[in-house]
Image (spheres, grey):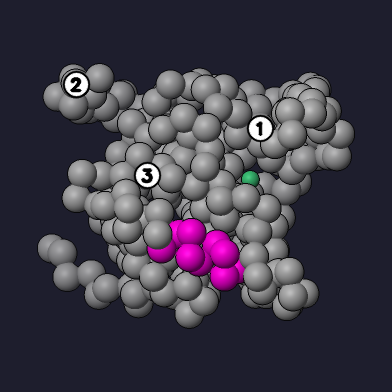
Amino acid sequence: MLEAVRRWRERRILASSALPDALWREAVEALPFLAIYTAPELARLRERAVLFLNAKSIVGAHGFEVTPLMRVTIAIQACVLILNIGPHYYDGWQNIIVYPDEFVTNQEYEDEAGVVHRREEPLAGEAMSGGPVILSWPDVEASRDWSTAGMNLVIHEFAHKIDMKSGEANGSPPLPAEMSGAVWQGAMNEAYEHFCARVDQDEDTAIDPYASDSPAEFFAVLSEVFFAEPALLQTEYPRVYELFAQFYRQDPAKPAKLTLER
Ligand SMILES: [Zn+2]
């Protein structure tokens, strides 16, 4: 979509839709990692969430009732990733499906040897290329606070969506023109190999060992850490932190700036 047309449409939606203050506050207060944002940044996040809720359908599966607070909680976290890079990263698909619990999908996948498998273990979340994002609500709720969960499900699945904007998830999202693909690949591969070696040696890593599953999972898990526990990523993989800061156009490890706006 042409940017001018998009902005015109966004202004029309924002003029006619809003999030009630009480609902917004309740959702934000349950997401401690938002504390780093200044008042103007939070106002922009709120606009993004309104536009997101307007553009996407969030529906319950198996009769699960998705409440307004659930919708806003999902929208805010999804929009944290695109706060400074724009909503076009989420173009091309429509639905978020919320399950009352972990779920099993009937998805088949082919391994490197060409053998087709059916996935049977229950999942907390899944992002499908060109299709929906699927979330288990209890897992969304449990992972709103990194300090207790050590993960963030919504950020994880929406990082996959951003990655999938260039095709299948492979840990290489479409980069802005000013970033070098070769530099990204080199630094990400190096960090991934290093992390896999640590996991292979049974090291008790502060970052979820699931990140060693594939370059796609490495990108999604490290994106969770970047937003929800940024100092950890900066300590463990400073080069990745730097690249993510350039890509997402955010510097979450920096202490919140003093708000000097009028
Ligand atoms: Zn994943």
Measure the C-alpha gap from mark 3 to mark 1: 19 Å
Q: In the image, which residues are magenta? A: 187-195
Q: Secondary structure at mark 2?
A: loop
Residue picked out by circle 3: 82
Is residue 166 within the magenta segment?
no
Q: Secondary structure at mark 3?
A: helix
User: Of the residues under marks 2 and 3, which one precedes in the sequence?
Assistant: 2
Tell me the quadrant of ligand 1. top right
The crowd level at tag 1 (other Cα within 10 Å; few <14, some 14-19, many 20+) is: many
* Residue at x 13%, y 63% (from the top left corner): 262
Q: Is residue 210 above or below residue 54?
A: below
* Residue at x 73%, y 28% (from the top left corner): 114
34, 25: nearer the viewer:
34
The crowd level at tag 3 (other Cα within 10 Å; few <14, some 14-19, many 20+) is: many
| Circles 2 and 1: CB atoms closer than 8 Å | no
Is residue 191 within the magenta segment?
yes
The amino acid sitting under disc 2 is: Leu
The amino acid sitting under disc 3 is: Ile
User: Horizontal and vertical percent for residue 132?
Assistant: 59, 25
45, 88: nearer the viewer:
88
User: Of the residues under marks 2 and 1, which one precedes in the sequence?
Assistant: 2
The numbered disc on residue 134 is: 1
Quadrant where the N terminus sits is: top left
| One can see residue 96 in this view | no
User: Horizontal and vertical percent for residue 47?
Assistant: 33, 40
